[in-house]
Amino acid sequence: MLKRPIRLDMNEDPFLPPANVIAAARKGLSRLNRYADAEDLAQLRRLLADYAGVDDRRVVLGPGSEILLREMIHAFAGKRKVVMLSPSFLPVVEVARETAASWTGLRLSPPGFELQPDILLAETQGPCLVIIDSPNNPTGHLMLERQTVRALVENEEALLVIDEAYEEFARMHGADEEAPDNSFIDLVEDYANLAVTRTLDKAFGLAGARVGYAAIGEAFRSVFASFYPLLPQPSLGAALEALEHPAYVEQHVSRLIEERERLRQALQEAEARVYASHANFLLVRSRAPDMAARLRDEGVLVSDVSNQLPPGFIRVSVGTRRENDAFLAAYGRIMEDVH
Amino acid sequence: MKKTIGLIVNPVAGMGGSVGVKGTDGEMHQRALELGAKPVTPKRTRDTLSHLTCQDSITFLAAPDQMGAAYLEEIDVPVTVIGAIGEETSAQDTKQIAQAMVDEDVDLLIFVGGDGTARDIHDAVGTSLPVVGVPAGVKVFSAAFALSARAAAEMVDAFVAGSTLTEEDVLDIDEEAFREDVLSSKLYGTLLVPEVRSFLQPAKAASNVSVPSEQVKQDIARFVVEKMEPATLYLLGPGTTVRAITDEMGVSKTLLGVDAVQGAALVGEDVNEQAILRLFETYDDRKIVVTPIGGNGFIFGRGSKQFTPTVIRAVGRENVMIVGTRDKVTQLDCLRVDTGDRTLDETLAGYMKVTVGYREGMMVKVRC
């Protein structure tokens, strides 16, 4: 059998969820001939609402948060200007560009990758659909402040969707630090034109189950009126079990943050430019413009973000300690060759 | 059917890097040698050849010895040698052999060198022949180059497999100024290169169907032309993205210069500052259309004989339109201005909108 490459390219959790979650997924297989039960789906919405601190009537489910974002884009972008970050989660950028009446990317420039609130607010006057991922993928930066979000949604013609796929990593970012504005999901109760998407793919370690959700304001209600997310039985079983016993999430996230910071320091020592992250990945700039391809030759997959950023940028998901060490060793070998 | 591919290596390119000499134009090559500079091109050339997956589909022609043939001979690849060289090679050798390759009807020319080599290749072949540039200069700014030796090999593979072609910039970097840490670059011309983006993509590609650059330039042009106001004077800067606008209008364009249009008519061809200021006597409503040059993002560079500080001030920041393909813009850290007038540069700094497609724009930071 061929040796499998080390996958640090998809921002997955490198750790399996606990045995009870896997057992619940397996139990779902015994119902493979049936669609998901309506009561189970309602229970999942209630658990997610509790977890996120919102009313369960605001929660919609989907097979991955990307699908929910696509639904919103297809519903609203055709007659509106779409405003997004650049770089951002590329599949969503592409569908927005193809669908939108007009598209504006707010360029995040190295080294700070900052989003200037005045530029954001100036570009979001009138009818528009604004999609912002915070923490941003691939920079890992938090992009918004509460007052900016409020100012934006005060424009009732604007629809704002905040993608919080990596929210847990920002929230658990060290108790001593001043808490940044890592989530805006509570504001959904106040603003009809705000929606927040999230996922169990990342911090819950359920990428293979693909369970996404959104908390939506009233203006988004019509989009999902005829949207029946009949999740696969194993996914539904795993998600219910994970949310009933979510203590493991904090353990996974803490381990990954610790490992992320170790990786960051090691990369800095290897003279890479590496940026502070609030997610389970690091954005790295090296002097090798084809670093991703070279790493692939070494058996390590990282995300080649050269289609969104200048040459030399890669996005590295935080893996297990062994995987990260293998990446660092390969990175070191390549840089020796580049010298 | 086999493709005939030529190889020309500039043996002295890049030698200044290790000894702190920026560029090896003119006498600086000798200076670099005195400082113990090591050749860069052998490794880059070997890397490129070793990453080619389509060698069996290629018939090679090459410049003699260390200008090309030696690298193919050492890996036992049959090669026909073109031209003759002396002990020391020169830009003239590059130009003559490139021209001879055109006469031999090569399908593609691989060259290894820096911005100076790219200019020599441009002088010899223009856009009559697709080329692949392997970067081996001290600093390689021209967008016509592949990003690396490996990327160059991918471009050759893409060409053999039938990729589309696109025009990319060759820059004229003033090495004297560069040694003083002033980046004074302007567009020298363009080369025709295979478009790899539409052919090779990593696992999570930009999209399933990548749109060729030339199509994107047409989309940008269509959008700009639709928005044009009939009474306004448009000063169209250098570059192929701006040329697409005049193509859309059906008027001719000076690739390296500035042309003026109003309505659907050309009212000034290859105009300099004086000619532009005379046009301003007639037209009160004015706009400048520019594209960032090469890989460094300059929209207004020092030494421009057309878009001088006087001209830019008379047009106004709000009337500067920037165009560029999304691929090009995303490769930049930011946009840059260096007009030589610090006060004006500070006025231009901040965020400006770049039209990157039909009804598509990006707000990009301008630094000075």
Image: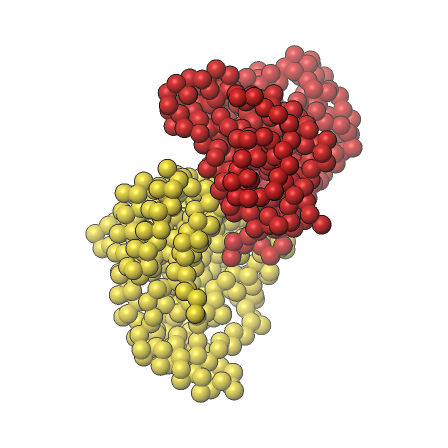
Chain colours: A yellow, B red
- For the image, the number of numbered tags is 0
Q: Residue at x 64, y 36 (%)?
A: B80
Q: Please state the horizontal and vertical placement of residue B124, each as a whole percent of the image.
A: 66, 26
Please state the horizontal and vertical placement of residue A219, each as a whole percent of the image: 53, 61
Which residue is more in the foreground, B281 or B250?
A: B250
Q: Quadrant of the C terminus of chain B?
A: top left
Q: Position of residue B46 (x, y in %)?
A: 49, 40
In this rendering, would A262 be left or right of A101?
Answer: left
Q: Name which residue lies at 70% across and 32% down.
A: B102
Q: Is A261 on the left or on the right of B318, as rendered?
A: left
**Which residue is more in the foreground, A339 or A207?**
A339
Q: To which quarter of the image does residue A29 belong?
A: bottom left
Q: Residue at x 51, y 57 (%)?
A: B203
Is residue B138 among the parts visible in the rendering? no
Q: Is residue A159 above or below residue B143?
A: below
Quarter of the figure with residue A197? bottom left
Q: Position of residue A280 (x, y in %)?
A: 35, 57
Can you name the residue that lies furthest to the left here?
A: A176
Relative to the observer, which residue lies in front, B179 or B313? B179
Considering only vertical position in the picture, is B82 above or below A74? Answer: above
Q: A263 above or below A19?
A: above
Left or right of residue B5, residue A283 in this image:
left
B238, above or below B324, in the image: above
Name the residue at 39% across, 69% down. Answer: A206
Residue B279 in view here = yes
